[in-house]
Structure formats: C-alpha cells, structure tokens
Amino acid sequence: MTDERARHDHLLARLARGERIEAQDEMSATYRQNLVHLMTMQADSELAGAYGYVPWIMKAPGVEEKLVVAQIVKDETRHAKVMYDLLEELGVDVHVHVDTHDQSFARRLDDSEADIGTARVATDKRVNIFYYPIDTWADFVMFNFCMDRGAGHQLEDVRHSSYGPWRRGVEGIFKEERMHIRHGELWVKRLADDRAARDDAERTFHKWYVRTMNIFGRPGTPKNRLYRELGLKQRDNDDVRRTFSEEVRGLVEALGWRVPDWKPAWETLPEEAQIPG
C-alpha cells in the first residue's frame, strides 16, 4: 500500500467516526484536490455575482433599493474574501488566480435570452448562471429569488462539511444569503401584485427558474458520490434540486403563477460540476 493510499484510508476512517478535518496536513491528496475545487467554485461565483450586481446600484428604483443593492454587492464581495482566505490557507495562490480571471468575472453573454445549459464560456470556475446578464429590475429580483435560494440550499450541505474552517466560514455567508432571498421574495410579491408588471415578471421568473435548476448538477454522478464520501457534500444533486423546486413551487403557486417545465440540460450537453453562492 502506498503512503498516499494509507493516508487516504486513514482520513476516510476518521470521517466515518464523524471527525472533522481542520488542517492541510490531515488531508489526503484526493481530499484536498476536491475541497479546493469546490471552494474555488464558490469563491469565484461570489465575486462574479458581486460584479454582475454593481450596475444595479445606479439603476435600482429609488434610493432605498440602491442602498439594498450596494449592501448585496458588499456582502457578495465579503463572501468571496472569506472563501479566498480559506483557499490561501490551503496554499492556493489567490492573488494570481484572481488577477488572471479578474476581467473574466465581469464577462456576461450578449444575448439575455440565451440558453447555455451547463456549458462554460470563460476560464474561471463560477457557476455558469453568472454568465447571464441582468438587464432589467425583474431580472435582478428573480435572480435573488431563484439563484440565491438555490445557493442557500447548497450551502446547507456546506454547513455540515467535514472541513471545519469551511463549515465555520459559511455560517455568516448563509445568514446574509437568507437576507438576499427575503429581498427577492418581497419584490416578487410586489411585482405579482402590480397588474402592469405581473405578466412580464412571471415570464422573467420562468427564465431564471430554468437556469437555476441547471446549477445543481446531474443526479447520481461518481463525482457527487465522492464528495459525499469525503463529507464535502451531504446529498445527491437531485435531492438538493428537488428541495429547491418544491419550495419555489409553493411560493409562486400562492401568487397564482405556475412553475415552468424543465428539461435536464445534460441530456444533450456535457456535465459541469457546479456549486454557488
């Protein structure tokens, strides 16, 4: 048995006893590689999300909403900083990573109605929903309502992560994401109650709901099983997606809206493992 195999088996035995991993010298190469991958996806998503919100500080309706958007930008940037600090502790050269991708984080698709499924169009590791532009206030609201909610469901797994620093770091992130979700809920109800805005708002919801359903990944993948074996995720991708979908259905049907049909993008496109924030 190689040293690395013995190290990994020892780590799995510790995880089976419910122990937490606290430092890099406790990790096998497999554990560290997958942990870094997942945390980088979250960090890049947080920063790309902040960049996408910035224009709406100026365009939001009214001073109060401009302040709310500015606070969300601040929150998302702070979330990115928390995650990049954790990655730095694991030896990742965060300065080089962010400097390399800084322009990429601001990149958005030209076509606001495009459907890229689970494909990537840039070299950073953000969840691909952050490639879509936020062109209208309804887009901003439905992004809050759908994507922040989807991220919240995924962060529920991180709150039970086998990596202690990530688990602790995500607690503050999770609380702030819940505030963003509540902002989305407030505005969804306002738009649904506005006769002039209601139909367009429902169409916009349909667009972002489908995009959010694609972020959770394929069901039953070997990669997801490995994440669960390592304690980096707790549930299958489809279980998280189903929980999200059922919650959203209850909220929008109470407004008289319907949940659109959704066809898994991976039936025709290659898999992209994705988590937000």
Image (cartoon, grey):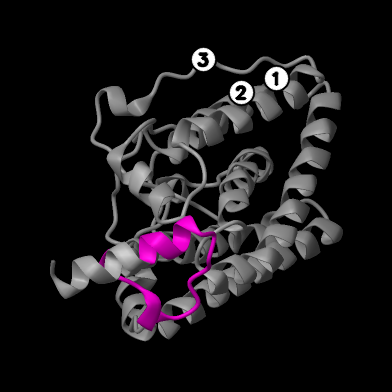
Can residue 104 be seen in the rendering of this structure?
A: no
Residue 243 lies in what quarter of the image?
top right
The answer to whether residue 125 is magenta is no
* In the foreground, 20 or 134: 20
Residue 202 against residue 222 in the figure, above or below: above
Magenta part of the chain: 11-30
User: Mark 2 and mark 3: span between their CA atoms?
Assistant: 13 Å
Can residue 163 be seen in the rendering of this structure?
A: yes
Q: Is residue 162 left or right of residue 26?
A: right
State the SS at label 3: loop
Please state which amino acid type lies under the numbered disc 1: Asp
- The label on residue 203 is 2
Please state which amino acid type lies under the numbered disc 3: Asp
Foreground label between 2 and 3: 3
Kindly identify which residue carries mark 1. Answer: 199
> Dot 3 surroundings within 10 Å: few (below 14), some, or many (20 or more)?
few
Residue 60 against residue 19 in the figure, above or below: above
Confirm or deny contact between disc 1 and disc 3 (CB under 8 A).
Answer: no
**Whole-percent x, y for residue 91 in the image:** 35, 84
> Dot 2 surroundings within 10 Å: few (below 14), some, or many (20 or more)?
some
Residue 97 lies in what quarter of the image?
bottom left
Indicate which disc, 1 or 3, sits on the residue closer to the N terminus: 1
Kindly identify which residue carries mark 3. Answer: 261
**Whole-percent x, y for residue 7 in the image:** 28, 71
Q: Quadrant of the C terminus?
A: bottom right
User: Mark 1 and mark 3: span between their CA atoms?
Assistant: 17 Å
User: Mark 1 and mark 2: span between their CA atoms?
Assistant: 6 Å
Please state which amino acid type lies under the numbered disc 2: Arg
At x 35%, y 59%, the residue is 125
Q: Is residue 179 left or right of residue 168?
A: right
State the SS at label 2: helix
- The label on residue 260 is none
